[in-house]
Each structure stands twice: as structure tokens, then as C-alpha cells.
Image (cartoon, helix red, strand yellow):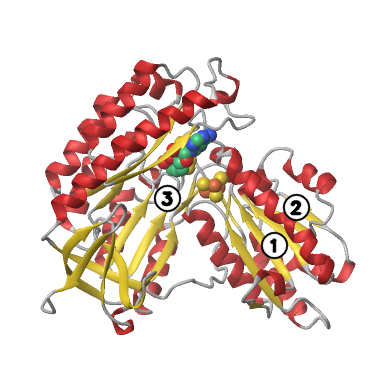
Amino acid sequence: MSDSIIRIPEEEIRRQQGFADAFAALPGRPETYYIVTYGCQMNAHDSEKLAGILESMGMRPAGDKREADLVMHNTCCIRDNAERKALGNVTWLKEVRRERPQMLIGVCGCMVQEPGMAEKLLKQYPFVDIAFGTGNMHEVPEMLCRVVTERKRVVSVPQNESTVAEGLPIRRQSDIQAYLTIMYGCNNYCTYCIVPYVRGRERSRASSDILREAEVLRNSGVREVMLLGQNVNSYGASGGDMTFPQLLDHVAALGIPRIRFMTSHPKDLSDELIRVMADRPNIMRHFHLPVQSGSNAILKAMNRRYTREKYLERLSALRAAMPDIGVTSDLIVAFPGETDGDFEDTLSLTAQARYDSAFTFIYSPRTGTPAAAMPGQIPPDVASRRIAKLIEVQEKNTAAAFESMLGQTVNVLVTDRSRRGKDEMTGKCERNISVNFPGCDSDIGRILPIRITAASHTTLRGEKIGTA
Ligand code: SAH
Ligand code: SF4
Ligand code: F3S
């Protein structure tokens, strides 16, 4: 790791473990916890780390948040509605607490790292007992000890954002699929995006730490590992000791049945990465490659650092090497200054890209980002019309992709019962599309060949081979 990235010293991790042990021995301390998670995979995985820390303090999960002694909200602030939802739910809990005064209410995650948010929580949310940012989760034992023994509110946002904590406990949600963080933060500064401000500078974990964790997961029988980072393709540019394709190749060589990764920035998608994927059948045939816009003028204003042409060229290179690959995307409509012509470019790119699916968003101004101060903010009615049109175009892509899969046999990692009940199972195929099929609980955790027989709006249906 480079000098500017500070690995939290082992003594500090041990010191926190001391607080965890002390907490466990406190008479009348909170016994149960409940974590409400908002946002992306990064946050979902942070919640697994938080659960691991809380359990190392002797706490256990509560079945219902109304009954928990500590309710943590792991927040997201990527768009205004994400933030409003989290704050609304925190406020609602205040009412629940009237019945159970011993309940502690906590807020953590990206929103807490927003400039000014710590002060806002202190002033306007006096019922919040504990709040901390994404960068100081390892201090939870110490903070909670203070909340409980000193009966004080603790609001703490880290000063130094360039840290990486290793050796923390993790309470994983699934023993079939696991997240594995390879890097933290983001240096890309897309002009609309708040992530670099709330997640800090890009920091790569040491490859030895990543590979050790991957090995432990493999040995425990995990079927699928997802490597996580805001821009996995720049792994190594910020302190790691190899490139992302090299790291991916090493992880794949460990023999875990399925490897996925998220998210890739189109400007950094290298031929080397395409080669590694094509050579390793256990790297899944799915690529999430957010384009954001199909207009070169808007891409420039977004600071995305690629053109429509370059994006489409990368897509062709991917498909040339792996014709069966499924590609998905994120798209933003109504970025400031987006003309009808710019929007038409997004529609035509979307049609051309033939995405399996795409997340579509209306641009949401985030205070402190350059785009929030740009002229030409788009009225909500125009934005709504545009997103509806975009969704229509993408739905045609999805229908065409699903249609082309009818009759094919795909490998499905079975993860759950489907919503239909105990006789129908669900899982993802290599392209990351949900597939439902008649089956039983003993299928869960297995990778089964399924013949696709029908397609609905968002899922495929099929049957086990040999049982038709
Ligand atoms: N690091 C990833 C994902 C970041 S957040 C990447 O670069 O692709 C996930 C998606 O949220 C982004 O891809 C973008 O489409 C969307 N997004 C981010 N900021 C937004 C904003 N201010 N308004 C609307 N959508 C936004
Ligand atoms: Fe945000 Fe851009 Fe970084 Fe993704 S790459 S997290 S969109 S700044
Ligand atoms: Fe949201 Fe933070 Fe993820 S802002 S999208 S939870 S990185």
C-alpha cells in the first residue's frame, strides 16, 4: 500500500476488542440489534461488518426492529429520495421508542459523511443516540460503550478518510454468496455524484489481504464471491500491488465456482480484463458497465472521460470475446443542460447497447457537487417524460434478450425459494438474470442446469434438465 493510505494499526483493532469485551460485561446493556440498510452493495456489506462488530460485543439480531434494543440505519445519500427515506424512517422510530424507552437509535453510512450532516443530526435529530461515518465503523465498540455508560449521545465523523481497517469480524447474510471489498472510495468525481465526498479517496486493499479472505470463503464452501468497489477497474492505481485483471485472475485461480465484480468504469475497461474474463469460465458472463448518457456533450459535462463511440467500442470488444455475455447499465436523464437531442442520443445508445437490464434515474442535485450549480436544471415534468420513454426503450431490450434465451440451458446458482412458495426455487444465471423453476429446498446452494421455457417482465422461468 502507498504511504498516504493508513492501515488502522492492529493495536487499535485490539483496543476496540477490549471495549467490545467490556461492553458484553455491562449489566443491563442493550442485548439485541436490528440494522436497516439503504443503498448499494457496498452498504449491504458494511452492514455485515457492523453486525459482526455488534455480535463481537455480545449482541444478537432481533427479529423485528420494534423489539430491538439498538436500531441502526445504514444510510445512502446518492439521490435526494434515498436520504429523505432514511431520515423519515429514523424519525418514525422516535414514536416507537415512546413504548420502549430503552431503545437506542443510530445512524451510520454515507449520509452521515455529508458535509454539515453531523451538525444537522445533533441539532435537528436529538433522539439519535449514536451516529458515525463510513470511515470509523471500527470504533463502534468504544462509541457504544460511551453511549451506554455515560448516557451521552455520540456523533463521530472521521478526520482521516484514507484509512483501511483489516481484521474486523463480519457476520455474513448468506453462506452461498459473499461480498469481498477490494477497494474503498472513489477518485473519479463525476460532476453529479456525491460518493467521492462521502466515501473518501480511493484506497485499494493489499492483494494479500484480499486473497486470504477469498481463500477463507472458498474453504467455507461459498459458491459465489462478488468483488466490490466503486470503480474496480482502477484497483491498484491507489495503493494496491497489482492491476484489477491480475487480481481477478488470482481470485479466479482459487477455484471458487463463481466470481462477479462491481462496478466498472467504461474509461478503464482494458483488453487485459476482457482476456482474463474470457479465459476463466468461473468469472461470470455479466458486465455492469454504467454509461450514464449517450450524448458526448453530456458525458463531458458529467466528467465521465469517455465518448459514446469509445463506450460502444468497448462493448463490441466485450461481446467479440464473449458472445454470450449479458451487459447491464445505469442511466441518468435530465442532467443539467440535457437537450431533446442529447436525450435522443441516450435513447439510441440504449437501443444499440442491447442491455439485459438498466437502472434508470432522474438526475438529483447533490449539494456540493459541481452539477448542482450548473445552469440549465431540467423541470420535473420534462424529466418524468424522459425517464418514461427511456424505460420503454430498455423494456424492449429486456424482452429481446429474454426471447433470445428461450430454449437455452443456463446454469443457475439456486439461492432461495421464489415468492410463489416452497415448490418453486429461484437463483441467478451466469448473466445475472433471475430464473425461477419448480424445485425443492435441497436445490438451494447448488448450481443446476435449467432449460428456459418462458419469460416474464423481469424474470425467466425454466425447468430442471431431465425432469420435463
Ligand atoms: N460507482 C458506480 C456507481 C455509483 S452510484 C459507478 O460509477 O457506476 C450508482 C448510480 O447512481 C450511478 O451509476 C448513477 O447512475 C446514479 N447516480 C449517482 N449520482 C446521481 C445523482 N446525483 N442523480 C441521479 N443518479 C445518480
Ligand atoms: Fe460516483 Fe462516478 Fe465515482 Fe461512480 S465513478 S462513484 S458515479 S464519482
Ligand atoms: Fe449510496 Fe453510499 Fe452506496 S451514497 S449508493 S450507499 S456508496
Would you say 234 lies left or right of 287 here? right
Depth order, front residue of 352/319: 352
Residue 139's label in the rendered image is: 1
Q: Identity of the amino acid at label 3?
A: Gly
Label 2 CB-ligand 3 distance < 8 A:
no
Give the class, few, some or many, for how many residues have Cα within 10 Å of label 2's Cα (few <14, many ≥20). Answer: some
Q: Nearer the viewer, mark 1 or mark 3?
A: 1
The image shows residue 175, relative to residue 336, as above or below, that is below
Q: Secondary structure at mark 1?
A: helix
The image shows residue 96, relative to residue 352, as above or below, that is below
Would you say 112 lies left or right of 406 here? right
Depth order, front residue of 8/181: 181
Residue 17 sits in quarter? bottom right
Depth order, front residue of 114/377: 377
For marks 2 and 3, the one nearer the N-term is 2
Asked if labels 1 and 2 touch by Cβ distance under 8 angstroms, the answer is yes
Q: Identity of the amino acid at label 1?
A: Glu
Q: Position of residue 462 (x, y in %)?
A: 20, 67
Q: Position of residue 263 (x, y in %)?
A: 39, 47
Label 3 CB-ligand 2 distance < 8 A:
no
Name the residue located 82 percent from the left edge and 45 percent from the top edge.
124
Q: Give the residue number, with chain letter if any, for mark 2.
A: 156
Q: Secondary structure at mark 3?
A: loop
Depth order, front residue of 65/314: 65
Name the residue located 25 percent from the left edge and 55 percent from the top edge.
431
Q: Give the residue number, with chain letter if any, for mark 3.
A: 240
